[in-house]
Image (cartoon, rainbow, N blue to C red):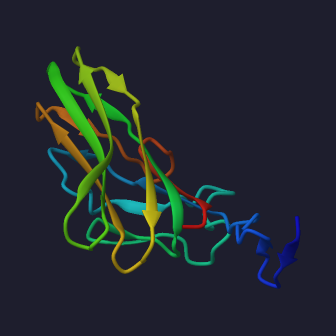
Amino acid sequence: MAVTIFSDGRIIDSNGINLAPKTVVDKWRLTGSVTGNQDPISSNLERDDTTGHGVPLGDSTGMTHSSGTWTFPSTGIWRCEANWSIHNSSSTSDWCDMDILYTTDNNTYYIGGRSVVAIPHTGDYMQPTTTAIIDCTDTSLVKLRFRVQYAHSSTYVRGNTTNNYTYFTFTRIADT
């Protein structure tokens, strides 16, 4: 099989397949707890600034967000993961939905991934993970949001500025 190696690091085989797609990893966290339904989660967000995590790997800009809408730094197939820390402070909660929403037209959002938990006792914690694979074909049209919905107001998503209680990881895994 013949391959062509380009100066930007791409290695293209004779079938036109990039054997070395650009990988990007970026990690953000919730800096303060949020209570009640959040559609989308739009505040208390920061890039993880813990030693060794602060700079997006593989891309100088990484993910950006505005009012809870996330923009990809480049096209490609992206694995988006939300690791939630959910706490029930004073009541039994029937359920809590944690969603990753995406759009391909910068308008209509669909559920790309969902986690649902029931928190049966006061003081309980849950640590669900929601994952979605997003094909970003156009960075101006394909966007992402995180949403959380509760059955009871005593349930909240935990955040912290120094610990990753609730955090979001974005990994570019392939070319589109």
Name the residue located 51 percent from the left edge and 50 percent from the top edge.
Answer: 162
Compared with 32, 105 (above or below) is below
Q: Position of residue 30 (x, y in %)?
A: 39, 53
Name the outermost residue toward the left: 152
> Image quadrant of residue 86?
top left
Establish if 138 lies above or below 157.
Answer: below
Q: Quadrant of the C terminus?
A: bottom right
**Residue 2's x, y, as percent?**
88, 70
Residue closest to the eye, 75 or 53: 75
**Which residue: 71% across, 72% down?**
16
Please indicate whether residue 66 sits to the left or right of residue 94 in the image: right
Q: Is 143 left, or right, of 16 in this rendering?
A: left
Image quarter hosting the N terminus? bottom right
> Between 72 and 133, which is closer to the camera in this rendering?
133
Q: In the figure, residue 65 lies in which quadrant?
A: bottom left
176 or 56: which is nearer to us?
176
- Measured along the vertical axis of the image, is residue 139 above or below residue 21? below
Residue that protrudes farthest toward the bottom in the picture: 7
Residue 77 horizontal/vertical position (percent): 53, 61
Q: Residue furthest top?
A: 121
Q: Residue at x 26, y 56 (%)?
A: 41
Query: What residue is at 19 percent from the left and 27 percent from the top?
Result: 95
Compare residues 140 and 43 and report the one nearer the observer: 140
Q: How many marks?
A: 0
- x and y percent of residue 148 in the render? 23, 45
